[in-house]
Image (cartoon, rainbow, N blue to C red):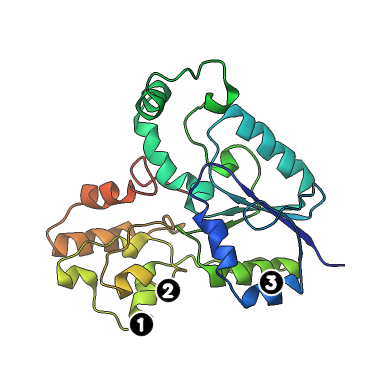
Amino acid sequence: MKPKVAVFDFASCEGCELQIMNLEEKVIDLIDIVDVVSFREAMKENSNDYDIAFIDGCIVRPLDEKRLKEIRNCANILVAMGSCACFTGINGLRKQFTDEDVKRTVYGNAIIENNPYFDVFQPKAIDEVVKVDHYIYGCPIDRNELAEVITSLVMGKKPDIPNYPVCVECKQKENICVFDYGNFCIGPVTRAGCGAICPTNNCGCEGCRGLVNDPDTESELEVLQRYGLSLDDALDRFEMFCYQKGVVK
């Protein structure tokens, strides 16, 4: 019997879910090995009977927290999908403001008191609420990596998510370092798996996949010093996706 898969979204742009549909003909191959029973962005059907849950987005409300715990109770395997789910991503930028400031800026004088939909707290990554079994990083996720993760889970294998820096993929593509073009890049300490898509297109890495587990900070410092930059310059860059000075999972 094929494993039953469900996809759920919380606070996000839902771009990671769109990547599932961007798999195009590969979707047919995946449907051969899994049964998708719930996926709001792509189908009307819905079921609480599933084996694997993919979570897109971070948690920003008590009602989200409650719903996520219910999903975790139903799922044998739970996968955090994308930067928002893995470490709050761009949503994490809201951590520099109070909840009241955010609500006032977005909704102005609208009456939002005593409404659970506007009862928000500081963004939380999925594993700050429930146990996460696997992570798929990126903003958005890489669709080919997603397909590999699903295939691995169906086979009972641990997904092979890279834990080496983007620079490795850059060298494999024989790219000229973007620092030599006068651009800034945090690829030396950012987790690979994206195919170095940004540096390949002459844009410095923004760190959307988060830090590698054991970043080589000394090498990063050497690179920064070579180009007259500081560690604070790199940490500030990380705030785009990993707010709070690059402290990510």
Q: Are marks 2 and 1 in contact (CB under 8 Å)?
A: yes
Task: Report crowding for label 3: few under 14, some 14 to 19, many 20 or more residues within 10 A (C-alpha).
Answer: some
Q: Could one spot residue 136 in this view of the protein?
A: no
Direction from residue 137 to residue 33 in the image, left or right: right
Distance between mark 1 and mark 3 Cα atoms: 26 Å
Query: Can you identify the residue that label 2 sits on?
Result: 195
Local packing at callout 1 (Cα closer than 10 Å; few below 14, some 14-19, many 20+) is few
How far across and down, in percent of the image, does residue 225 sit?
Answer: 16, 60
- Residue 136 is situated, as x and y percent measured from the top left of the image, at 55, 59
At label 3, the amino acid type is: Thr
Q: Residues within 10 Å of mark 2 (few under 14, many from 20)?
A: some
Q: Which mark is residue 42?
A: none
46 up-or-down from 182: above or below: above
Residue 168 vs residue 14, the one in the foreground? 14
Whether residue 108 is visible, yes or no, is yes
Q: Which residue is mark 1?
A: 173
State whether residue 75 is above or below residue 16.
above
Q: Secondary structure at mark 1?
A: loop
Choose the circle earlier in sequence order: 2 or 1: 1
- Secondary element at image label 3: helix
114 or 5: nearer the viewer: 114
Above or below, comparing residue 26 to residue 70 in the picture: below
Residue topped by disc 3:
151
Q: What is the quadrant of residue 54 in the picture?
A: bottom right
**Residue ID at (19%, 64%):** 183
